[in-house]
Amino acid sequence: MALRKLRVDERLVRVIQAIYERVSTAVKLGEEESDAFPVRVGVLQGSVLSPLLFIIVLEALLTECRTGVPWELLYADDLLLIAES
């Protein structure tokens, strides 16, 4: 949704969606590894695309919030919104 809002070409949006379809991961602790489980939220850890996607989504969220909030503060992956009530 955020990519489309920024008018990113639909072909590129579909490529990024394909990267995130049917993703699974496992947790390794010492020598033990868990069974694989699906990843349904978030960005892929270690992907060079992840920081850009995070910024795009955050910008889309902020664009929506700016209409009714008088003050905002951003730092790394934190967001502070201040309203009068």
Image: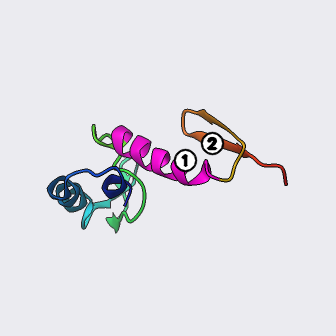
Q: Residue at x 35, y 67 (%)?
A: 37
Lower sequence index among marks 2 and 1: 1
Q: Position of residue 6 (x, y in %)?
A: 34, 49
The chosen color scheme is: rainbow
Q: Position of residue 49 (x, y in %)?
A: 28, 41
- In front: mark 2 or mark 1? 1
Assign the C terminus to one quadrant of the image: bottom right
According to the picture, the residue beneath numbered tag 1 turns out to be: 62
According to the picture, the residue beneath numbered tag 2 turns out to be: 79
Cα–Cα gap, marks 2 and 1: 9 Å
Q: Residue at x 31, y 57 (%)?
A: 4
Is residue 62 shown in magenta?
A: yes
Amino acid found under the numbered disc labelled 2: Leu
Assign the N terminus to one quadrant of the image: bottom left
Q: Residue at x 48, y 46 (%)?
A: 58
Main secondary structure along the magenta-highlighted residues:
helix
Q: Position of residue 35 (x, y in %)?
A: 34, 66
* Secondary element at tag 1: helix
Amino acid found under the numbered disc labelled 1: Leu
* 23 displayed left or right of 77: left
Is residue 15 shown in magenta?
A: no
Q: State which region is magenta.
A: 51-67
Asked which quadrant contains residue 51, the reply is top left
Q: Are marks 2 and 1 in contact (CB under 8 Å)?
A: yes
**Mark 2, other Cα within 10 Å: few <14 / some 14–19 / many ≥20:** few
